């Protein structure tokens, strides 16, 4: 029985597990939403929420504590300037884990982990990308139709007279 045993091992050694969580949390703070397995998402959630809580203090000591884990300076700047301001007075629960179903290759349960207050921004970006994609497909169809019309116009019609039979 696993009484009072916290955390998941994720099939890794301690150093590899730590590196995995650091990489996942860095990419989550950079992109605001990542897709990973359910177990990794649940472990990353606690790791990132502790980092964000430290960042909310905003002093130098907390910044150095966060920088012990997140090595990317741009991500740390964004965390302390934009993310903390956006989160504001929220007392916790900065992330959301949404289950997606099983992966086709190995049937691993997949999930999306995202920062809660950035959900509307990401959806707006997705809508913009979708509209751009639709415009591109319309343009391709129109170009194809124009090219077909030109090729039809360019084709010469040759009237052939039936050949007379020679005797």
Image: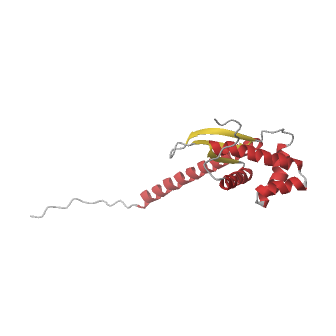
Q: Position of residue 162 (x, y in %)?
A: 22, 59
Name above or below for residue 117 compared with residue 19. Answer: above
Please tell me whether residue 67 is drawn above or below residue 121 in the rendered image. below
Q: Is residue 111 visible?
A: no
Location of residue 93 (image quadrant): top right
Which of the image's four quarters has the C terminus?
A: bottom left
Q: Left or right? Give the position of 34 relative to 60.
A: left
Q: Residue at x 43, y 61 (%)?
A: 154
Image quarter for residue 42? top right
Question: Can residue 108 be seen in the rendering of this structure?
Answer: yes
Find residue 88 and report its horizontal and vertical position in percent: 86, 43
- How many numbered markers are drawn? 0
Using the image as rendered, state which of residue 111 and residue 131 is in the foreground.
Answer: 111
Is 37 on the left or on the right of 64, as rendered? left
**Front one among 108 and 5:** 5
Identified at 24% across, 60% down, the residue is 161
Q: Position of residue 139 (x, y in %)?
A: 57, 53
Q: Nearer the viewer, residue 1 or 111?
A: 1
Instruction: Give the vertical position of 159 relative to 98 (above or below).
Output: below
**Residue ranking furthest to the left:** 167
| Residue in view at x 79 percent, y 49 percent | 51
Q: Residue furthest bottom?
A: 166
Residue 166 placement: quadrant: bottom left
Quarter holding the N terminus? top right
Place of residue 12 in the rendered image (x, y in percent of width and height, measured from the top left): 62, 51
């Amino acid at each position: 029985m696993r009484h009072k045993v916290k955390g998941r091992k994720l099939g890794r050694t301690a150093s590899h597990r730590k590196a995995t969580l650091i990489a996942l949390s860095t990419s989550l703070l950079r992109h605001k939403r990542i897709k990973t397995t359910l177990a990794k998402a649940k472990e990353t959630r606690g790791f990132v929420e502790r980092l964000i809580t430290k960042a909310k203090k905003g002093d130098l000591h907390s910044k150095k504590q966060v920088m012990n884990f997140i090595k990317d300076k741009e991500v740390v700047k964004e965390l302390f300037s934009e993310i903390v301001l956006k989160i504001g007075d929220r007392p916790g629960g900065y992330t959301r884990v949404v289950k997606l179903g099983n992966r086709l290759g190995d049937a691993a349960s997949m999930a999306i982990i995202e920062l809660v207050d950035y959900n509307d921004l990401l959806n707006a970006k997705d809508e913009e990308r979708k509209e751009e994609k639709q415009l591109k497909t319309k343009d391709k169809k129109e170009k194809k139709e124009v090219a077909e019309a030109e090729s039809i116009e360019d084709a010469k019609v040759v009237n052939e007279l039936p050949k007379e039979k020679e005797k």
